[in-house]
Structures are given as structure tokens and as C-alpha cells.
Image (cartoon, rainbow, N blue to C red):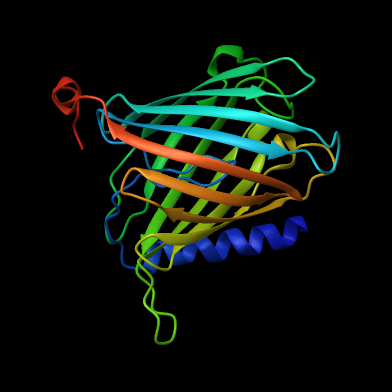
Amino acid sequence: MSQVNVCRLAAGMLLAMLVAWPISSAHAGRLIATPYAETLPAGKASLWQFALHESRTTDNWRTLNRLDIGLSDRVELGIFVINPRDGRTDTWVNLQYRLNKETKGMPVMSIGVWDAARIDKFSGRRTGGSFFVATGKTLKPTLGQLTPEYLKLSLAAGTNRLNGLFGGIDLRFTKETGVFVEYAPTNIRLPKSKSVDVGLYHWLTPQWRARASWMGGNPMLDVFYTWTISSSRFQSSSRG
């Protein structure tokens, strides 16, 4: 996808965020490989287990584990562990701060950093701390005679691994089932991978979700679980 087309897509998504009607969602928005502006509520946590096949390079599987915790209604802590089959395990510490709540006229916005323990330079690197700013909007569109549960739009920009513009959509077309489409920056890509991810997901219960994705040409499966740690423990520091 050319830089001109990326900019046009970004401008269209930003316009949609500013004019469309928001709705609430039971879960904080998440994409596949890039940050979304929503954060987990205070005392909520989510755990992911990924299995990714490196079809375009090593032809091996790698596993990925991700834990996110809402420290307050604005602050989220994440730990991301990457386990290549024939490589060294890599662990990232991620922090995200939500600047505002989404309203009818204002998308939600966040700032954050991935791999916060290894901050070095601010742009152009494929390793180290990666700062970002993200914005998102949840819409209730009508597609002909169909009325999906929601459509989430995401647009963001970052440094290092997240260098450049990126974003995506999450279309929940039934109460349990939806699809992701995501454009991810080059520096976070596996070698020889394409820039677009597509994923189909299904909520098995209100806590468990399964998803099958195509990560730039590499197949991936993941299981997601969300739960409440202790709402009372976190509520004293939680302000919307």
C-alpha cells in the first residue's frame, strides 16, 4: 500500500470518527498487532496466548503471550512475551494512558509506549521503546438491512517499531462474531510479510474469545481471556 493511499485512508477514518455516533462496548478495543486508544477499566485484566506460523521466513511456529491490566480507568500496564522457536525470548513492558472518554463529538485518545524498559532513540529503529498516540471511535452503522453490533475505527502514529501511521477496523457483525482488518507499520513486521492483517473472531463466552488471523501472510491462532482481578482494590484511583 502506497504512502498516498495510507494518508487517504487515514483522512477518511478521521472524518468518520468526528461525525459518527458512538456506542458503548463491553470490552476495551483491541486490534491484532498495533495499539488501540481504549484502555481496560480499573481492576480488569486480559490474557492472550498466540501461536504464529512464520510461513514467509523460517517455516517454524513462534508463541506469544500478552497480559494487560487496568491499573486505573485511564492507565493500562501490559507485558508481552515473544518466544521464537529458534531464537531468544523477548519481553516488552507496555504502558498506555487514556487522555479522555469517547463522546458523541470526540473520539477516545491515548498516548503510550511499547517496550518501555528499552527507550533509546525516537524514530527509525526496529527495536527498543516505541512511543505512540492513538485515537479511536465506536460507531453503530447500518449496512443495508444489516445492523452490526458496532464498528470500531482506529488511527495512530508512532516511533521505532511503531514508526509511521497505522490503524484498522473491528466490525462486530453479531453479538459474538466479528472481523479485524489492520494496517501495521513496516518496522513491526516479520521479514517478507505484507502490511495488512485480517482476523476473524468469536466470543465463546463473555470471558473467552477465539480468533484466526492472517498476519501479513503468516497464519496465527490466539485465545483471549478477560476477567476482574478486584474492582474494589482499584476503584479508589479510578476516575473516568
Look at 27% across and 56% down and name the residue there.
24
Q: Quadrant of residue 132?
A: top right
The residue sitting at the front extreme is: 204
Q: Is residue 4 above or below residue 110?
A: below
Quadrant including the N terminus:
bottom right
Q: Position of residue 228 (x, y in %)?
A: 25, 31
Look at 74% across and 30% down and name the residue there.
124
Q: Position of residue 75 (x, y in %)?
A: 34, 28
Q: Name the side, left or right, on which 202 lies relative to 199.
A: left
Look at 33% across and 43% down and name the residue there.
207
Q: Quadrant of residue 86?
A: top right
The residue sitting at the bottom extreme is: 145
Q: Position of residue 82 (x, y in %)?
A: 64, 24
Q: Name the side, left or right, on which 127 lies relative to 16.
A: right
Tally of marks: 0
User: In this view of the protein, which residue sits in the foreground, 54 or 156?
Assistant: 54
User: In this view of the protein, which residue sits in the foreground, 54 or 3?
Assistant: 54
Q: Position of residue 65 (x, y in %)?
A: 54, 27
Q: Quadrant of residue 111?
A: top left
Quadrant including the C terminus:
top left
Q: Name the side, left or right, on which 71 lies relative to 148.
A: left
Look at 34% across and 63% down and name the residue there.
175
